[in-house]
Image (tube, grey):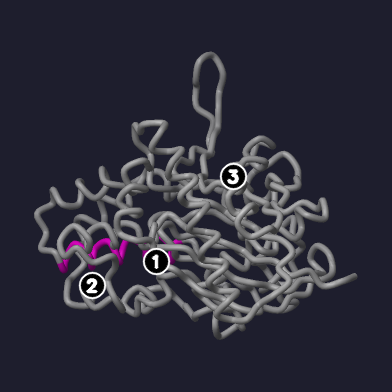
Amino acid sequence: MKTMRVAGVMSGTSLDGIDVAVVDLRGAGFKTKFEVVAVGSVPYPQPVREALLAISNTTAHTGQVARLSFLLGELYADAIRSLCAKAKVKDLQLIGCHGQTIFHEGAPVPFLGKKIASTFQIGESAVIADRLGVPVISNFRERDVAAGGRGAPLVPYVDYLLFRHPKRYRVAINIGGIANLSLIPPAAGPETVVAFDTGPGNMVIDQLVEWFTGKRYDEGGAIAARGTANETVLKDLLRDPYYKRKAPKTAGREQYGKEFVARLLATGLAFEDLVATATALTARTLARAIPKEADDVIVAGGGVHNATLMAQIPKARPSSDFGIHPDAKEAIAFAILAYESWHGRPGNLPSATGARRAVTLGKLTRQ
């Protein structure tokens, strides 16, 4: 089978920017072989980030949503073009673009006489295809939701491909805005992989830091290191029934957005203690979900750079120790998922999302 060159594009709930990975792929399914050609990241301009926050999980003008969707298409195309030029990458054949989630409700709720689950990612794929002259697969989550799944997490398919081991129990974690993990027992088949969102990742920490300082994140976990986690507040936060709910389950800005941060601010804790408490919440909800028998805890995402957070997660090691760039894993994942979709193969794991069956993900926009 010939090698196919695919770009994966990811912008997550942390709203920090656009991650791009160019990957050469060959083979099929869980026998797929890959080589990462180039990775890069472009931060969102502050006005774009503020505009996205203003339409996420809230009442918004349809014109604003439409404009931002087309603007993101331009920004995604620019990010891919910039990385390819910098890394001297040619012959791109396909793009997999996750898009920017502005609403996600994976569990059905009553709506106008029916029970509806829904998810909404923006970032117009037609713009990307037109600007780069390359076909684009986008909107991966919708197909899983239509098949009865939660639409997330989708990365476990790739976690299994990357990290399965015949003898070691591995836990693959991604700490973006939301934290999620994949449980991969030794010699596990894909149908036995369990995955779910554990709760907040960087989202609450970032909102607090931005509220008090205007900066986007706690660099290296330095602010949390100066504070003390408040055990009374933590105990109250950890009573949330979500943490005891069985998988599949998903979380998002709907649970950990501005209302959640307002609740923390109302405690009256000092800034450093608030950040330390939010950091401990992320670590403890992850730690609760990591089986004691786990051999390797492999962490990717922006949270890997927060030393204070990493120190509180049992057995945590960056995914770079296992050959995967921690800032690019999800971009790599959507390159792989796009490759599978292009060939008409399923890309979800029903054991992770709760879907009735494995389905081919995404929508194709031809160049």
Q: Which residue is mark 3?
A: 151
**In this image, 336 relative to 345: left or right?**
left
* Relative height, residue 96 to residue 160 (above, below): above
Q: Which region of the structure is painted magenta?
A: 272-288
Going by the picture, which residue comes out furthest to the bottom?
321
Residue behind mark 2: 224
x and y percent of residue 48 in the render? 35, 53
Query: Residue 272, percent across and down?
Result: 16, 68
Name the residue beneath numbered marker 1: 43
Residue at 70 percent across and 58 percent down: it is 134
Q: CA distance from mark 3 to mark 2?
A: 32 Å
The answer to which of marks 3 and 1 sits earlier in the sequence is 1
State which mark lies toward you, 3 or 1: 1
Left or right: 350 in relation to 98: right
Could you classify mark 3 by the number of other residues whose Cα lies within 10 Å: few (under 14), some (14-19), or many (20 or more)? many
**Closer to the camera: disc 1 or disc 2?**
1
Q: Position of residue 209 (x, y in %)?
A: 22, 63
Q: Residue at point 62% right, 68% down?
A: 332
Residue 254 lies in magenta, yes or no? no
Earlier sequence position, callout 3 versus callout 2: 3
Q: Pointers 3 and 2 in contact (CB under 8 A)?
A: no
Residue at left 36%, top 44%?
255
Relative to residue 196, is residue 295 depicted above or below?
below
User: Viewed as shown, does residue 55 lie left or right of 123?
Assistant: left
Crowd around label 2: few <14 · some 14–19 · many ≥20 (10 Å): many
Can you name the residue that lies furthest to the right here? 1
**Which structural element holds mark 2?**
helix
Q: Amino acid at mark 3?
A: Gly
